[in-house]
Amino acid sequence: MGRAQTLSRQFVQRMVNDAAARSLVEPVPNPAHQRSSLIRLTEPGRAAITAVLDRERAVLRRAADDLTDTEIDACLRVLSRLLHVMGDADVD
């Protein structure tokens, strides 16, 4: 997960620990690796993610109301370029 989002292992572990302390995630056995667990969302975790996504969608709808197609295309070009450049970042 950290590599896919260009995040350090330490940051991901800290976020998992914080989420576990709030009962938003739980460890489950990892059949592919006995010494490490998989992390699964709990029902409160799913509800929290859903609430965040709903808020983000509402904000994005308001933000996009007055943008032109040209502005959106320019934004997509810039974000694509950032993703390309940041995809080469080493987080370990």
Image (tube, grey):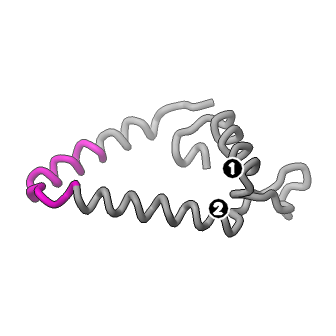
Taking the image as shown, residue 79 lies to the left or right of residue 65, namely: right
Q: Residue at x 51, y 66 (%)?
A: 50
In the image shown, does 27 or 42 lie closer to the viewer? 42
Q: Is residue 40 left or right of residue 36?
A: left
Considering the whole magenta stretch, tell me its main secondary structure: helix
Residue occupying the point 24% across, 51% down:
76
Q: Quick one: quadrant of the C terminus?
A: top right
Residue 45 circle label: 2
Mark 1 falls on what kind of element?
helix
Disc assigned to residue 19: 1
Q: State how many labels appear.
A: 2
Q: Which residue is the extreme one toward the bottom?
A: 43
> Is residue 67 inside the magenta stretch?
yes
Q: Looking at the picture, how far across and down is residue 25, in whole percent?
A: 72, 57
63 vs 66, left or right, is right
Q: Amino acid at mark 2?
A: Gly
Three-letter amino acid code at disc 1?
Ala
Q: Earlier in the sequence, mark 1 or mark 2?
A: 1
Q: Could you tell whether 16 is left or right of 80 in the image?
A: right
CA neighbours of label 2 inside 10 A, class few (<14), some (14 to 19), many (20+) = some
Q: Are marks 1 and 2 in contact (CB under 8 Å)?
A: yes
- The boundaries of the magenta stretch are 63-79
The residue sitting at the right extreme is: 34
**Number of residues whose C-alpha sits closer than 10 Å to that of mark 1, classed few (under 14), some (14–19) or many (20 or more):** some
Residue at 15% across, 60% down: 65
Residue at screen point 83% across, 62% down: 28
Q: Reply yes or no: does residue 15 show up in magenta.
A: no
Residue 72: x %, y % from top left: 17, 54
